[in-house]
Image (cartoon, grey):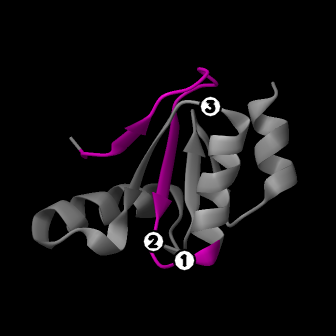
Amino acid sequence: MIKMNHIEGTNSGNIQLFALSTCIWCKKTKKLLDLLGVSYDYVFVDLLKGEEKQQVLDELYKWNPRGSFPTMVIDDNCIVGFKEDQIRERLSQ
C-alpha cells in the first residue's frame, strides 16, 4: 500500500497525483486541484527513499511508462503533464 498525503474536498472520483516537490508544473497541478476544491491524494516521489520510492515508481510506470511528472490518475484515466483544460473538464463530469 502506497502512503500518500490526503487533501479533503469534494469527491470527484479517486484522484492520485504523482509529483516532484521541485517541479513547477507539479505545483501548478496541485494548486489547481486545491482551487477546484476536490479531494485527492498526492505523493512527492523525490522525497521518498528505498523500497517505498520503488513501490511508488512501479505504480507510476503502470500509468505513465515514461515516468514523467506530474502524472495524475483520476479513476481509470491518466493525465500526464499540466493540462488545465483537460483536468477541469474531467473533474466537472
Q: How far apart, in angstroms, are the residues tagged by discs 3 and 2?
A: 20 Å
Q: Residue furthest left?
A: 51
In the image, 83 versus 21, the foreground residue is 21
Q: How far apart, in angstroms, are the residues tagged by discs 2 and 1?
A: 5 Å
Q: Position of residue 26 (x, y in %)?
A: 58, 66
Tell me how many marks there are.
Answer: 3
Crowding around mark 1 (Cα neighbors within 10 Å: few <14, some 14 to 19, many 20+) is few
First-in-chain label (3 vs 2): 2
Q: Which residue is mark 2?
A: 20
Which of the 4 quarters of the picture holds residue 47? bottom left
Residue extent of the magenta highlight: 2-24
- Please say if the residues under marks 2 and 1 sit with CB atoms less than 8 Å apart: yes
Q: Position of residue 53 (x, y in %)?
A: 23, 66
Question: Which residue lies at the image location 81% right of the left edge and 55% below the top edge?
Answer: 84
Which residue type does callout 3 highlight?
Val
Question: Which residue lies at the image location 65% right of the left edge and 71% below the top edge?
Answer: 25
Q: Position of residue 88 (x, y in %)?
A: 81, 42
Q: Which residue is mark 3?
A: 38
Q: Considering only vertical position in the picture, is 52 above or below 85? A: below
